[in-house]
Amino acid sequence: MSMRYQETIDYLYTRLPMFSRIGAAAIKPNLDNTIAICKFLGHPEKKIKTIHIAGTNGKGSTSHMLASIFQEAGYKTGLYTSPHLYDFRERIKVNGQMCSQDFVIDFTNKVKPCIEKIEPSFFEITVGMAFDYFVQEKVDIAIIETGLGGRLDSTNVIEPELSIITNIGFDHMALLGNTLEAIASEKAGIIKKDTPVVIGTLDTATKKVFEDKANKENAPIYFAEDFIEFKSFQNNWQNALFEFNQPMIHLLDAPLFPKNFTIECDLPAKYQAKNLKAVLVAAQLLSTMGWKLTSGKVMKALSQIKKSNGLMGRWECIQESPRVILDVAHNEHGVHALLEQLASLHYQQLHIVTGMVKDKDIQAVLELLPKNALYYFTQSHIPRALPVHELAVQASVLGLNGHSFEDVNIALKGAIKNANHNDLILVIGSIFLVAEVDRTNFL
């Protein structure tokens, strides 16, 4: 890593307020700064074709799935996601390759006058950076994942080909609202005039919110559940088979898939079935809109998402014996999905290494975790991290017992030392905790 690049990244981190580090204080409650940045850059967001993805959970996996599909179909594909795990440049990729350090340096120097003038957040600048890079690289399509919410998210300056809202759950309530309807209303903000939207998970509490917004914008709305049913799941640890059928196949002009079909996916978690449904409906819609996506290309793309895009931290196995799994599950919805996954697997003792950030509903997550697991409490090294002793106290009140460690790697070493080869070790609770796992010990 060049010194100039390190200096640039330090400047971005220290000069700009960053939600992942400090929380709500970094959020600007409007799109003014993003619009100003885009104007300064010559409106790159208007020069690229995009797909916009929002949701409480699953938007990262969904974005990577779609990017993999477009890449496999031969399109030059941009992918903007957040946060990153190891390298800032993971946020901005073209055909699975991160943008260069030189680009980050040059872009930052270029926008410094704008930064000094308008005081943007870290996220607002990185969104502008992504748009600028995708124009420079002349991408055919860019998959854009929202950061937080939708309506006021910095990414919400694009006019996409299609939008996807994966699901709605309780997360970031202080910013998005305390009811599912309120949160759905914020996410529905990405629904644009005359632009199709796919809703990944059907929920009676939120269905009307989405329908009302879609009607208002004259946007065709597709609930994935209406088109594709999930039938069965077979887990092989490193990949999984998902069986689907299409009860209402006639509703899509040119179905890519037969009535019954099976997808092999290298994100081998049962919860990916919901994301896959949304992606499969989106792929069929996009193919009717002139994008050359075939069933063969879609199938192949979904079997190699990690290879084509380097997705990490989603039910990711980094050691076989004892098996060590990293997963960024960090809210009630995510942990529910994780528990469903655990129920489909065979192992002896479960060991859970966990640390959380203090602005999550910690009680709700802890109440879900299994009492019969052995716990290794820890914390990540960011200001938002919940101190490990507070986490251990809250957990022990709920009957979750274990030891505390100052660092995730020390905690993980402790778990591996304690575990038999048939045991399962999970590292969960925060994206930032997973990011601090030292992979050089495993890969």
Image: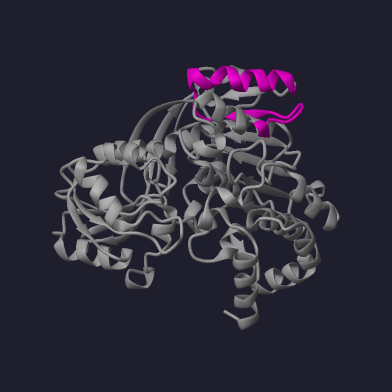
Residue ID at (29%, 62%): 319
Which quadrant does the C terminus fall into?
bottom left
Looking at the image, which residue sits at the far bottom? 3
Q: Is residue 414 left or right of residue 391?
A: left
Is 239 above or below relative to 255?
Answer: below
Which quadrant does the N terminus fall into?
bottom right
Residue ID at (77%, 46%): 32
Is 388 above or below relative to 5?
Answer: above
Magenta region, residue range: 189-217
Residue 398 percent location from the top left of the image: 21, 40
Residue 198 percent location from the top left of the image: 60, 29
Queried whether the magenta region covers residue 184, the answer comes back as no
Quadrant hosting residue 190:
top right
Q: Is residue 278 left or right of residue 161?
A: left
Residue ID at (44%, 54%): 431
Quadrant hosting residue 337:
top left
Q: Nearer the viewer, residue 404 or 158?
A: 404
Queried whether the magenta region covers residue 208, the answer comes back as yes
User: Is residue 293 visible from the viewing direction of this image?
Assistant: no
Residue 290 percent location from the top left of the image: 74, 36
Q: Nearer the viewer, residue 237 or 323?
A: 323
Is 264 above or below relative to 256?
Answer: below
